[in-house]
Amino acid sequence: MKATLIVFWKEVRENLRDRRTVINTLVTGPLMAPLMFALIINASISRELAKAEQPLPVPVVGAAHAPNLIAALRRSGVEIKDAPADPERAVREQDVDLVLRIPDGYAKSWSAGEPAQVEIVYDESQRDAQGPVARLRGMLNAYSQANGALRLVARGVSPNVVRPVVVAERDQSTAQARGGGLFGMLPYFFILGVFIGGMALAIDTTAGERERQSLEPLLVNPVRRGALLAGKLGATSAFAFTSLVLGIVAFSIAGQFLPTDKLGISLQLGVHFALSTLLVMLPLVVLLGCLQTLAAAFAKSFREAQTYLSLLMFVPAVPTMLMSLYPVKTQDWMYAVPLMGQHVTILRLLRGDSILPSQFAMCIAATTVAAIVAALVTAWVYRSERLAISA
C-alpha cells in the first residue's frame, strides 16, 4: 500500500509540474466545453426569439392582386417588401429568406368562391429561412381559416360543420423533461471530459516513461508490479475524476445564464444531480483509466500513444450516436452496458425521471465488473518484461 501511494504522489506531482498539461486537462477541457455550449445555445435561442418578435420582412410578387390579404399580413406584423426580379435565384443565393408570389388569377378565384392559390418560394436547406417560412405559413393558414368560416356563415352554415373532429392536446411533459431533451448531449460531454482528463497522465505514465527510458528503473525496484500499476491508475483516475467534477460545476454555472424560462424548459443541475452523476460515473472513471493505460502500454513513444488514444476517444461517442439516431424506450438491460448505462442514467436525471435503486445498482455493478476485467488485463500486460523496452 505504501508503494502504491508513493507512485501515486509521484505521478501527481510530475503531472502538476507540467502547466500546459494541467491547463488542458483541468481548465480547457472541463471549462471550455460548457462555455462554448452556453454561448452557442444562448446566441441561437436569443436570435430566434428576437427574430420572432420583430416584423417579418416578406418580398411579395403580385401584391396588387390581393389587397385584403396584404392588409391582413401587415396587421399580423409582416413588412411587405418589393420582390426581386428573379425570386428563385434570389432565394438560392440567400439574398432573401423567402418570397410570396400571388398569381394573376388570385382575385378571380377569390371572387368565385374557389380556392385561391399563393406560393411561398424558399429553400428548405437554409436554416435561417425555416423560422420565417413557418411564421408566414401560419399567418396564411390563419387567414384562410378565418375567411373560410366567414364564407360558411354567409351561406347560413355553421363553421363547425367542417370540423367534425376537434383534437384536444394534453402534453404530459414537464419543463425539466423538455430541458433534458434539449440538453441531451450533456452525458457525452461528461464522459468525454473524463476521457480527456486522464488521457495525458495515462500516456505519460506508460509510453512517456518508456520513451524517456525511466520506466525500466522503476520496474526493477523490489515492488510488485500490481502496486506500481495501482499507483499509476490511481493518479490517472484522480485527474479524470477532478475533470468530471469541474465539468459538472461548470455546466451548473453555465446553465444559469441560458434563457430557459423563455422556452418553457428547466435545467436542474443541483446537488442531487451532481452526487448521482458522480456515483454512476466513478466506476467508469476507473474503466476508462484502465483502457487508456492499456492502450498506452502497447505504444513505444508518446506520439504513438496519442494516436492510439485518439482512436479510443471515439468509443464514448458510440452510445450518444446510437441514442440520437435510434431513440428507443429505456430498457433495464441498457443499465448493464458500460457507457450506455451512464448515458441513460444521466439523461434520465436531467429529465427528472425516477430511477429505481436496482437500475442504479445495475449500472454501477456492471461498469465495476468491466473495470475490474480491464484492470486485470492491464496488470497482465504490466507483468511482461517487454513493457520497459522502448526500441
Image (cartoon, rainbow, N blue to C red):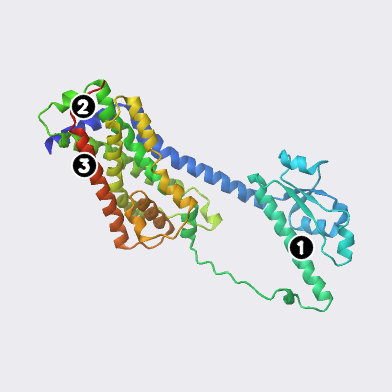
Q: Residues within 10 Å of mark 1 (few under 14, many from 20)?
A: some
**Which circle, 1 or 2, is nearer the viewer?**
2
Q: Is residue 117 left or right of residue 292?
A: right
Q: Specify the amino acid type for callout 1.
A: Tyr
Mark before the other along the chain sequence, 1 or 2:
1
Between 331 and 237, the residue placed more toward the observer is 331
Measured in 3D between alpha carbons, the distance from the residue under mark 1 to the one under mark 2, in whole angstroms, is 79 Å
Q: CA distance from mark 3 to mark 1?
A: 70 Å
Q: Quadrant of residue 207?
A: top left
Residue 271 spot, x, y in % from top left: 35, 54
Task: Kindly identify the amino acid type of the residue bearing the numbered disc 2.
Answer: Arg
The residue positioned 34% from the left and 56% from the top of the image is 335
Return the residue found at the far left: 222
Which kind of residue does numbered mark 3 sit on? Leu
Q: Residues within 10 Å of mark 3 (few under 14, many from 20)?
A: some
**On the image, numbered disc 1 is attached to which residue?**
143
Question: Is the C-beta separation of discs 3 and 1 under 8 Å?
Answer: no
Please state the horizontal and vertical placement of residue 216, each as a whole percent of the image: 18, 24
**Circle 3: element type:** helix
For the residue labelled by badge 2, is the local secondary structure a helix, a strand or a loop?
Answer: helix
Residue 188 % position (x, y): 41, 46
Q: Which comes before the other along the chain, label 3 or label 2?
A: 3
Residue 116 occupies quadrant: bottom right
How far across and how far down the image is residue 126, in percent? 65, 44
Estimate the spatial distance between the alpha carbons at disc 3 and disc 2, rounded to whole Å: 18 Å
Determine which residue is flagged by label 2: 386
Disc 3 designates what residue? 376
Instruction: Confirm whether residue 315 shows in the render.
Output: yes
* Count of numbered circles on the image: 3
